[in-house]
Amino acid sequence: MSPLQGEMTLSYLGRIADRYGLTVRSLLSSVTDVAGQQDVVGALQGDSEVFLNAAARDRVVALCRVPQVGLRRALPAWTREEPLGPSKERPAARLRNGVETVAAWGPACPGCVAARTGRVAPARVYLAAHQRVCPRHRCWLMSVPGSGGRVVGLAGCPVVIQAQEDHRRLLRRSPVAGSAFEVAEAVTAWWWAQKWPEETAWPTRLCATVPEREEPGRWWVLARGLVTYPETVAVAGVLVDQTMRRRIAPQVRGHLPFCLGDLPVLISELARCLRRPWLTELLQRCRYGVRHDWPTIMLAVPLVFSDVERRAHRMALQRRPRRPTCRT
């Protein structure tokens, strides 16, 4: 049985176990068994990953009949760690959970798995930020801590599907697009927490994607990345735009901005590209206070200014006095 590209090692072993009518725990015990003793350490949960030493990996190769080079190419965690057993010759397996895994992950698209393997079986794969949408089957591949993830239909949200195309185009166009997206995620997460009454697109999108019998409060937490994804991509696009930097330069006049209100061109462009004219006034009010410092720093400093200006900005932030927090 061949692995899926980018599949989690434990997911692959789980599919092998299913083929033989075993549980994945039983398979791990068999892979590490020596004279009736097994070496499997860690709790098995829905979001677990497993790391095998060389001896255990050799046994998996013999079991699945896929060469080591093929498994190494397809499974990102295949040789990521080398668990220590009583000896190097004895097979060992170590389970890791949640944030301890190799990278961001999510469920594999069920339709794509069925087309690839000829079987309907759950699988989990490592996913970059621009790989969360399956455009063919119109679904969002959501990771959920402590579980195997969730596949969310996007039939009512074509804007999310289009956003992934825009995201991939942005990554091809700009070498700093990856960093820009991380900054944009932090920005839209802050906006999400504000629950502005003027924001109507996000509540509509939230309702359009909520699964049946899902608790609304829990879905509000789980779905933030999905609901805000189009706007996150749009903000990232503004941050990598060199034309925007040239437009901001006359406003800065050799001085680093204290807050977003000092960059009206940036605010106006964000409001325009997000099609939210009401955002201009709200962001202009964010002028003072510790809770407004981080969106200013994250938005303006990492990508709009040069390395020298960033260092100067960090020094200025450390030395400046705090101003009273404003009420928005």
Image (tube, grey):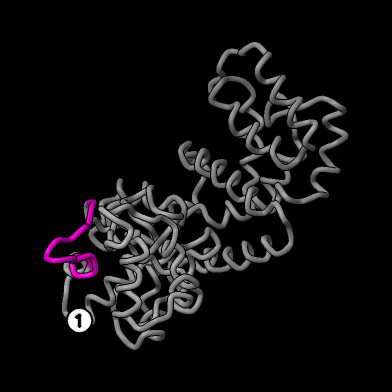
285 lies left or right of 76? right
Residue at point 65%, 11% (across, down): 321
Q: Nearer the viewer, residue 230 or 113?
A: 113
Q: Residue 177 placed where, x, y %?
A: 67, 54
Vertical order, 144 against 126 (above or below) = above
Q: Nearer the viewer, residue 236 or 10?
A: 10
Q: Residue 138 placed where, x, y %?
A: 46, 74
Residue at point 80%, 32% (across, down): 308
43 lies left or right of 251? left
Q: Quadrant of the C terminus?
A: top right
Residue at point 53%, 56% (across, down): 229
Q: Residue 288 placed where, x, y %?
A: 62, 20
The three-letter amino acid code for the residue at tag 1 is Tyr
Res 275 visible: no
Q: Quadrant of the N terminus?
A: bottom left
Q: Main secondary structure of the magenta part?
A: loop
Question: 10 Å neighbourhood of mark 1: few (<14), some, or many (≥20)?
Answer: few
Q: Which residue is most to the left?
A: 36
The answer to which quarter of the image holds residue 139 is bottom left
Residue at point 57%, 41% (across, down): 187
Q: Nearer the viewer, residue 79 or 36?
A: 36
In this figure, which residue is indicated by the disc labeled 1? 20
43 lies left or right of 75? left
Res 259 visible: yes
Q: Is residue 34 magenta?
A: yes
Q: Nearer the viewer, residue 267 or 221?
A: 221
Q: Is residue 144 magenta?
A: no
Q: How many marks?
A: 1
Vertical order, 322 against 103 (above or below) = above
Kind of element beneath mark 1: loop
What are the residue bounds of the magenta stretch? 28-42
Q: Residue 159 placed where, x, y %?
A: 55, 65
